[in-house]
Amino acid sequence: MDPERHIKGYVASRGYAAGPIYLLQGEAAPSGMPVGSPAEEAGKLHAALEAAGAELCRLMEELQDEAASGMVEFQVAMLEDEELYGPALAAIENGAPAHQAWRDCMDSAIEDYRSSDDSYFAERASDLTDMRDRVLRVLAGIRETAIPPGSVVVARDITPTRFLTTDWSGCGIALYGGSPSAHVAILARARAVPMIVGLQRTDAALSGEALLDAEAGCLVVSPGPETLRRFENDRRGALAQAEKDRAYLDKPAVTAAGEAVKIYINCAGPDDLAGLNPAHCDGIGLVRTEFLFENGKALPSEEKQYADYRMIVEWAGGRPVTLRTLDAGGDKPIEGVTIDGESNPFLGVRGVRLSLMDPPFYKRQLRAMLRASAHGPVKIMVPMVTAPSEMRSVREMLDEARDEVVKAGQAIGSYELGMMVEVPAAAISIEEFDCDFYSIGSNDLVQYVTASGRDNPALSNLARPDAPAVLALIRKVAQFGRSTGREVSVCGDMAGEPLFVPHLLDCGIRALSMAPTALARIKGVVARYGEATA
Amino acid sequence: MSNRQTGVVVLTHEVGLHARPTVKLTKLAKRYAAAIRLSASVDGPWIDAKSVAKVMSAKIPQFATLHFEAEGDDAVEAVAALIALVEGDFEEIPAKAASQAG
């Protein structure tokens, strides 16, 4: 039997799915088709454009929600626009076959969108890819292949219209490309189809049975009986518990003894907040700013960063928003930013270590964060801090950034500077670090304290968040925070895990930051904490 | 008789001139006989306001200033309608413009 394999990705749409893997390849490109005269080829292209447009119009009639039909309407309008297909007609005039002319014409348009440093426009490249492939498929006379219900679909990417024309009953989706803010991810959330994106590349082609855990962000291929049992348990438990916990969602978190616990959410960009009610939390405990860098190539400008941070701060409506400065490296390489070929990236130049190597780049991010504070309180959080000198350097740069913003006549509101506590050195000598607040990154703290890689499932019995050494460090940091009047929160997965939250409360932690989907569940755990046991 | 009309409006829509607003804007522009061009700068480059592909590929961000320039019999009405659409945050195509179109 094949060995069980765990492949990590980012959660784009939460849920669980299990079934055989279905590899969705790009629809075949036509080859070996007879090539006619330029007039005939032009006729073929016109006919294909019209047929593709007609398919989309039929799809649009079936769609109920505005966002989806707006996207399809856009594609229909584009396909009717001679400005779009003009270059293809010109190439046909010069002897190119219709499919080649259309592909080249669209590829250059796609590249143009993809290179935009505005993420909205960059993501429209997927709409154009969608249109390109649809017309190519019509030109080749191929129908869309049906996806068997109940499969776990693995693909490089899925176009939005392909998503919309498919019946996803019982299916889950794992994509190598994509991002949680891509259009298809938004559609998947709206339709509650479990999806993970940014799947780690593997050498072998995937096949066989698979489990998609789109709560933890993992695809398990060829699961063993133990994993299967746990997965089924998780899935069933999640359903049953969600039903019970719903009542806690819109209430503040209070322990059975009447002690208030702050409940924050983690997010990876403004799109994650769509449909969430800010009144259900006390603020945002972690914004992973890596989302800004996901399109690769062009690094985001200060303006682009400011616009995105501002959207998040405005959503929070006066509740504090914790913006973490870029945490690249480790398991989050970013093309053109992180250092390639490190033999041990988890112990390499990552987080603030990387940021301090490029002060202009870092200050640009700090300025954007400071400017966002004009719209609501901002907490700037520094990842991977190891030595007190690093925080001093950041503080100096932040002061410089503040002066620059002020000099530019731009507004700044209230802000704080704090650090993540995830390197054991920082936790052990926490009193050496002068910060406004502390947030424990439990995922990395666990991996570094137990010397067990996060990416190595064989060590999961050692890499436990409730290991006594981990809890001792958490207790120490919590006590230090309490004695100096500074907030200590936990923003790793541990804070959203019902099993571990009582341990955190035992350690004196009174602020937890978690995925929005965990809110009701964790508030329920907090409410039961300290109940007299019968 | 040929009229020439210009107009300026600030784009306040969420992320900029994205897919949906662009479709609405170009559809509205197509209802007029006048040649209509738009630009995010008074110095151009000017693009055909009736082409969804052209307008989208200009990737105009939020808070850009949109300049319209129309030439033709219904240039005045066209620019007024387009500005009303942008000012109304692309909620709907202005009724007056709709009734005038034909």
Image (cartoon, coloured by chain):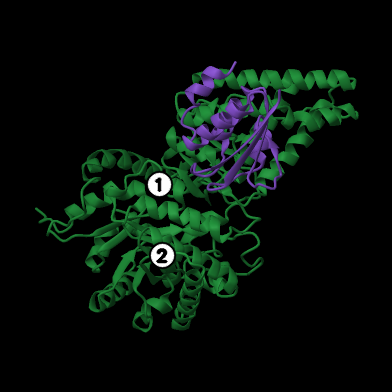
Q: Quick one: label 1 or label 2, which is nearer the N terminus?
A: 1
Left or right relative to B42: residue B87: left
- In which quadrant will I find the C terminus of chain B? top right
Residue A372 position within the rendered picture, expressed as x and y whole percent measured from the top left: 43, 60
Residue A343 position within the rendered picture, expressed as x and y whole percent measured from the top left: 63, 69
Q: Nearer the viewer, residue A80 or A16?
A: A80
Give the quadrant of residue A382.
bottom left
- Disc 1 versus disc 2: nearer the observer: 1
Left or right relative to A82: residue A296: left
| Chain identity of mark 2 | A
Q: Secondary structure at mark 2?
A: loop
Left or right relative to A368: residue A528: left
Q: Secondary structure at mark 1?
A: helix
Chain painted in green in the figure: A
Q: Which residue is mark 1?
A: A273
Chain painted in purple in the figure: B
Q: Which residue is mark 2?
A: A462
Q: Amino acid at mark 2?
A: Leu
